[in-house]
Amino acid sequence: MATVSILFSNFALIAVMMCAGWLASVAARNVTLVDSLWGIGFVLVAWHTFFVSDGDLGRGLLLLVMVTAWGLRLSVHLSVRNWGHGEDPRYRKWREAAGEGFWWKSLFKVFLLQAVFLWVISIGVQVGQIAPQPEHLTVLDAAGFLIWLGGFVFESVGDWQLARFKADPNNHGKVMDRGLWAYTRHPNYFGEMLVWWGIFLVALSVPGGLWTVISPVVITAVLIKMTGIPLTESSIEERRPQYADYRRRTSAFFPWFPKSKER
């Protein structure tokens, strides 16, 4: 199956999945469902590409395992976190601003827009699995896996620490500033960035893989400048006034030693 055909068929699969998710969100009046579909979409792309392409088996399996482990963990985590909590405050603001027309605007503003981003970010996975050369794993593959593993562990531990913190009733209304969260305000986002730079290194090992750098560049921009940190922090500051001090003393993204607390 030709590369272009695989790329377009993957986009079609993602679009169909997101449209189905949109229909479910209209029925439930809750677009937070799209968060759970995000990781699943990458898994869908990885498995479809693996079965329809004639790329190197070892590299294809490596990327399949990396994407499946990351995508399923993220989807399960977000589904459990969001269950029973209503619509995410970020999306609720969009719904209130759009008024009665949000039900159809969300198809484009939320679901299909994320479908486009998902497809672009998954370019490295697709190219890495499609390429038949080299017919063996390389140093770049190994380096990419190690960076991916570091990001996967960092993101998973950060999510686990936050979930435990929220589960304690004594922490209600408080700001999480312990564990990895003492060194970066968003260890989950930082870990996710590493995941995709690791996947890029694997794609870089194949001929012409350099252009897939668009994948980690886009996800990094999304996390730091678009729907990641800006939207998340705007909603947190409204609910937790003490977040301002945490923000002052803690690195926004890249882990670093915290500043001393105000007295």
Image (tube, rainbow, N blue to C red):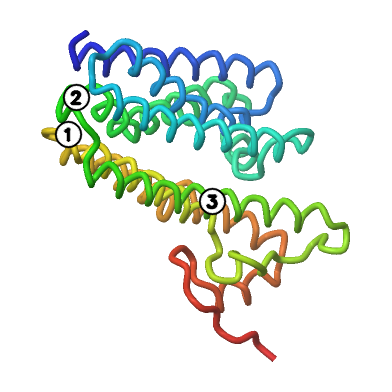
Q: Which residue of the protein is positioned furthest toward the right in this rendering?
A: 169
Q: Residue furthest top?
A: 1
What residue type is disc 3 on? Answer: Glu
Q: Residue at x 79, y 62 (%)?
A: 173
Closer to the chain start, of discs 3 and 1, is 3
Whichever of labels 2 and 1 marks the residue nearer the N terminus, that label is: 2
Residue that label 1 marks: 206
Crowding at mark 2 (Cα within 10 Å: few <14, some 14-19, many 20+): many
The quadrant in which residue 116 appears is top left
Question: Which residue position is annotated with label 2?
Answer: 131
Q: x, y percentage for residue 19?
A: 50, 15
In the image: residue 171, left or right of residue 214: right
Name the spot of residue 140 as percent of width and height, x first.
23, 45
User: Mark 3: few, some, or many residues within 10 Å (few <14, many ≥20)?
Assistant: many
Instruction: Measure how far apart labels 3 and 1 are at the Cα level.
Output: 27 Å
Residue, x 29% and y 26% (percent of image)? 126
Circle 2: element type: loop
Q: Is residue 49 above or below residue 87?
A: above
Question: What residue did someone put label 3 on?
Answer: 155
